[in-house]
Amino acid sequence: MTTEQELRSLFNTLDRDQDGKISINELFLSPGLSAVISSQTNTTSPQELIVQYDSDKDGSITFEELKQAVQEASI
Ligand SMILES: [Ca+2]
Ligand SMILES: [Ca+2]
């Protein structure tokens, strides 16, 4: 389990255009970090992460959605 601070810095690194959301393209641009996210959320691919945890269906993952995903995966 990562701390919120670690998750935040991971999120900021993945969010290349700094719009506050991680798009599927941004996940593909950083395969190493994307793999960390996958292991933290028990998903196997960026697609699966988006399908399972994009709760407002805008096609990208906000920090809140990511945090939720990590919390659910750690239960
Ligand atoms: Ca972004
Ligand atoms: Ca979303």
Image: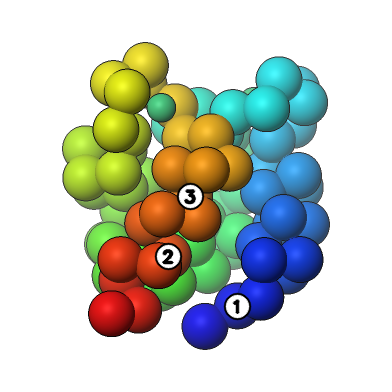
Say if mark 3 contacts mark 2, CB within 8 Å. Answer: yes
Q: Quadrant of the C terminus?
A: bottom left
Residue 47 visible, this orientation:
no
**Residue drawn at (35%, 79%) of the image:** 74
Of pointers 1 and 2, the one earlier in the residue sequence: 1
- Amino acid marked by disc 3: Leu
- Amino acid marked by disc 1: Thr
Per the image, the residue denoted by label 1 is 2
Of pointers 3 and 1, the one earlier in the residue sequence: 1
Residue 18 against residue 68 in the figure, above or below: above
Q: Position of residue 45 (x, y in %)?
A: 31, 53
* Quarter where residue 57 is shown: top left
**Residue drawn at (67%, 49%) of the image:** 11
Q: CA distance from mark 3 to mark 1?
A: 12 Å
Per the image, the residue denoted by label 2 is 70
Q: Quadrant of ligand 2?
A: top left
Horizontal placement of 30 versus 71: left or right? right
- Amino acid marked by disc 2: Val
Q: Position of residue 13 (x, y in %)?
A: 76, 47
Point out which mark residue 66 bears. Answer: 3
Horizontal placement of 55 versus 65: left or right? left
Q: CA distance from mark 3 to mark 2?
A: 6 Å
Residue 15 visible, this orientation:
yes
Within 10 Å of the Cα at label 1, are there few (<14), some (14-19), or many (20+) other Cα atoms?
Answer: few
Asked if ligand 2 lies within 8 A of label 3, the reply is: no
Q: CA distance from mark 1 to mark 2?
A: 8 Å
